[in-house]
Amino acid sequence: MGSAAVAAGIKGLGDVAPHVESAAIEISKRFDVTNIGGRASKGHINGSDHYTGHAIDVMVYSDKAKGEAVAQYAIANATRLGIKYVIWYRRIWEKGKWTAYFGTSPHTDHVHLSFNNQPGTGTAPVDNATGGSVSDLTTLDGCLGVVYKFFGD
């Protein structure tokens, strides 16, 4: 774990890629989360980005509202942070949309963020661009509502 992550009070990050560490620090500060798992040598599915230092687990435990806020922030800033996909509360966001997630962990106590090998654009942060929550995306009406909020009527 880099000295910046240690200084930020993050526990469990390990030796992640520099852009992953920067994203973890940003999310830690913005959402007051210090338990963020990162690089691992075991305990995840085969091919997990945790094994290469390109994934973090932002622990929110039973705070579903915080988890939704972290997930939405990650999505709104995916290009900037170099995020490949987000898993939260039995859903996976990738390629611009949420779908059901049926992996071994339902990800209900942490938000999983997987990162591209290369850093993102590094532009200014965006706060929850869609204006909707992850749970809004579980129905067709909810999805359309998020689209309308984002693009206007």
Image: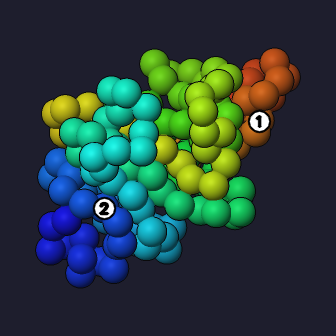
Q: Give amino acid for label 1.
A: Asp
Dot 1 alpha-carbon crowd within 10 angstroms: few under 14, some 14 to 19, many 20 or more: some
Specify the quadrant of the image occupied by residue 29.
bottom left
Q: Badge 2 is on which residue?
A: 13
Q: Which residue is mark 1?
A: 136
SS of the residue at dot 2? loop
Q: Position of residue 96 (x, y in %)?
A: 50, 22
CA gap between label 1 and label 2 equals 30 Å
| Viewer-nearest residue: 59 or 27 | 59
| Residue 62 in view of the camera | yes
Give the percent coordinates (x, y) of residue 93.
54, 28
Q: Nearer the viewer, residue 13 or 117?
A: 13
Question: What residue lies at 53% left-to-right and 61% top-to-bottom?
Answer: 59
Dot 1: element:
helix
Question: Dividing the picture into quarters, in which one does residue 133 lie?
Answer: top right
Which percent across, then down, holds residue 88?
60, 41
Q: Is residue 97 left or right of residue 135?
A: left
